Image (spheres, rainbow, N blue to C red):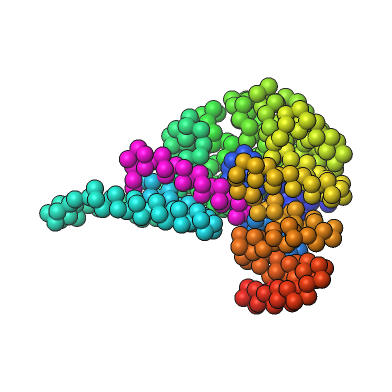
Amino acid sequence: MGLRDIFSGKNPEIYEQKGDTSFHAKAYGKAIVEYERALERLEKTSPWDDGYRQSLQEKIRNSKDVLALEHCQTATDLVEAGHHKDAGQYFELALELTADPKLKKAIHDQLQKIEAQLAEAVQIDSQDDVIAEQEKAPDEKPIHEEQNDEYFMALIGTLPEEVQDAYLSYPQAFKKGYLALNQGEFEAAARHLARAMEEHPDPRSYIPLELATARLNLEKYDDARRLLESFLQYHPDALPAYQFLCEIFWETKTFNQAETLLSSLPPELSESVAGYLLRGETYYHAGKYAQAKTYYRDFLKRYDWNEPVARALAKTHEALGEMANARNIYQEIMQQCHSCHSRIDPYIKQKFADLSFASGLNTSEVLELYLSLVRENPQNASDYYQKVSLIYSAQGNDEEAQRFQLFAEKAKDRSA
């Protein structure tokens, strides 16, 4: 069996891992695309795996929420700078992304304020309207091009300022390719980005990085690797290039090459959380779960608490079948969120609840977590209500068990 047979996308975990890498690199748009591809692959290969489906749906939702929050912050900065119209566009992008009722309400409130401010500021008499109509340029940009420009600006708005400036200086083909890449249209992305490289052949540009990303998603690993290795000669401190090279080595099972690459990381990357996670993930993908566990635990002892490392350690415990240890880590993550008054990722809630439920811990705490997940993840309400019913039954409360069983059946009918 050739490499293409092994890595032809049949395993949704491959796409999920790409999403995780993008998420940790704060490339949330790309993470969403990969998680959605994982979900699409799961529906084709294992449609009965409800637990994995819920996990992927939650990662998609979380990535969208984080990206929406970034857009909200950008919009807030624009409001403070007096650019209300541009701010409104970022708020609208955030509104399209998030399903969080509280965040949606907050965004609606901000949009209403902006509309009021714009209405107050705009004082144009009828004569100005006529002149503006007469002077409208015949070659004015179509609406869809303006929307593409806005989307492009929103995407690069999360990048470092010097990278933003570079991306804005590249030819039109680059913008088309970058938009296609973030929309999961990898063939089109590779085509446009290759053209952009021809039009802008400067080897110091960032175009090879984006083209490599497209080629990686098309499973053209050799092409992607050559582009990334060439890119690193000019940008040795570019973390995404190392992350994508590691993905290539993981997927082609050349773990020794991943270890060699990581041993050459610049000091500032080698000692970063991202650098540690890449080494740990290399152990994990190589099936060296015990080594990965020791590595992550040593990190937490040396540097104290870090949530991404804690999540990776919990996942490693699960791979080792050490479910109680994994459950305890997910619980600690929730406690850390409580202590700093931050929102608990529903994915973490569900991991803790599911591991507890599977081990027979039918406690009120687990029951309450499932009820909160009904509100946060309503499309999976039937499954959550079913588990609440079983917990009540285990507690001897048959009346509540029957009531929530009815809720589960009604929720299932609604989603059918």
Q: Residue at x 66, y 67 (%)?
A: 381
Q: Residue at x 44, y 42 (%)?
A: 74
Vertical comparison of 311 with 410: above or below: above
Q: Position of residue 200 (x, y in %)?
A: 48, 34
Give the residues in magenta. 59-85
Foreground: 81 or 255?
Answer: 81
In this rendering, does residue 237 appear at all?
yes
Foreground: 261 or 119?
Answer: 119
What is the magenta segment's predominant secondary structure? helix
Q: Residue at x 48, y 52 (%)?
A: 94
Q: Position of residue 15 (x, y in %)?
A: 69, 51
Image quadrant where one finds the C terminus = bottom right
Is 59 situated left or right of 284 in this image? left
Vertical comparison of 380 with 168: above or below: below
Give the total number of marks visible in the rendering. 0
Q: Position of residue 223 (x, y in %)?
A: 66, 39
In this rendering, does residue 4 appear at all?
no
Q: Quadrant of residue 376?
A: bottom right
Vertical comparison of 126 with 289: above or below: below
Please say whether residue 77 is one of the residues in the magenta stretch.
yes
Vertical comparison of 66 with 199: above or below: below
Hey, which residue is sitting farthest left in the picture? 127
Q: Position of residue 292 (x, y in %)?
A: 82, 37
Q: Residue at x 54, y 57 (%)?
A: 100
Please say whether residue 195 is one of the residues in the magenta stretch.
no
Is 169 situated left or right of 283 in this image? left
